[in-house]
Amino acid sequence: MYVILFGAPGSGKGTQASRIAQKVGLAHIATGDIFRQAVQRGTELGKLAQSYMDKGQLVPDDVTIRMLIERLDGLGGASGYMLDGFPRTLAQARALDEALARREVAVDKILYIKVSNEELLRRLSGRWTCRQCGAVYHQIYQPPQEPGRCDRCGGQLYQRDDDQPATAHQRLGVYFQQTAPVLEYYRQQGKLVEVDGEPAIEDVGRSLLAALGVPSPR
Ligand code: AMP
């Protein structure tokens, strides 16, 4: 199964992706995570990506597409994957379709986590991330048990540069201009499934699993 998890920054996409991918048994590929790892390692890709990420802009298509296709090649015979944060432009969506067609497979579904603009802004200005394991918290919606410490691994929480309020605003602007048209592209292919992203995290998770045909107990 080849699934795209789609949503604006602040839609809860990152939180849901790793859980759902694990439950469904799909490899989870998050381009944002790959870029952040490259930044941490100080590679050429990381240096290039950082300049865009810090400003809340998209990394150029040629670099992003090449990186994603290398990652897919690296997965070899994986029976499916869940893409998180890719495609974010029409050019990326077309490149993905071509890359999958060369492997004689295709995107099965794109799950769109729908959240209102007001709610996105509220959520984006309050996010904290664990420096060690990458877990994401929110000062109102999902606070850690101990302020500044990760519940999962005890790591230190920090506010990512791209979660600073001005950058968060910029990321939303980029989303509406460059990324939202991708929805239309897949809607026309009949592959778009909309899921309400405003209820509690567990409920959204259940809706996403149901959309993939996986029942989960209440
Ligand atoms: P994310 O963690 O998915 O919000 O991604 C963080 C940042 O990484 C984005 O704001 C972009 O600068 C960059 N990025 C991640 N995925 C892509 C992509 N598919 N195309 C371009 N830039 C991306």
Image (cartoon, helix red, strand yellow):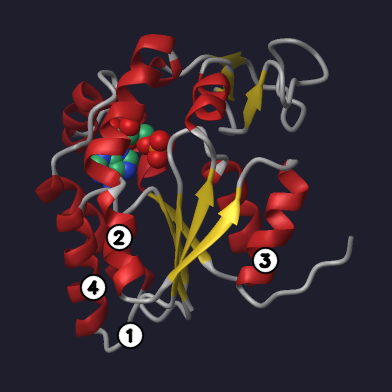
**Residue 41 position by quadrant:** top left
Secondary element at tag 3: helix
- For marks 2 and 4, the one nearer the N-term is 4
Question: Residue 117, position in %: x, y?
Answer: 47, 30
Question: Residue 36, position in %: x, y?
Answer: 37, 33
- For marks 1 and 2, the one nearer the N-term is 1
Q: CA distance from mark 1 to mark 2?
A: 21 Å
Up-down: is 3 above or below 85?
Answer: below
Q: Are marks 1 and 2 in contact (CB under 8 Å)?
A: no
Q: Which residue is mark 4?
A: 97
Q: Are marks 1 and 3 in contact (CB under 8 Å)?
A: no
Q: Residue at x 72, y 30 (%)?
A: 153
Q: CA distance from mark 4 to mark 1?
A: 9 Å
Circle 1: is it few (<14), some (14-19), or many (20+) Cα within 10 Å?
A: some
Kind of residue sitting beneath label 4: Asp
Q: Which residue is mark 2?
A: 184
Q: Is residue 36 visible to us here? A: no
Q: Residue at x 69, y 54 (%)?
A: 205
**Residue 175 position by quadrant:** top left
Secondary element at tag 4: helix
Q: Is residue 152 visible to us here? A: yes
Circle 2: is it few (<14), some (14-19), or many (20+) Cα within 10 Å?
A: few
Q: Which residue is mark 3?
A: 209
Kind of residue sitting beneath label 2: Glu
Q: Which residue is mark 1?
A: 105
Question: Residue 168, position in %: x, y?
Answer: 40, 20
Q: Is mark 1 within 8 Å of ligand 1?
A: no
Kind of residue sitting beneath label 3: Leu
Judged by depth in the image, the label closer to the viewer, 2 or 3, is 2
Kind of residue sitting beneath label 1: Val
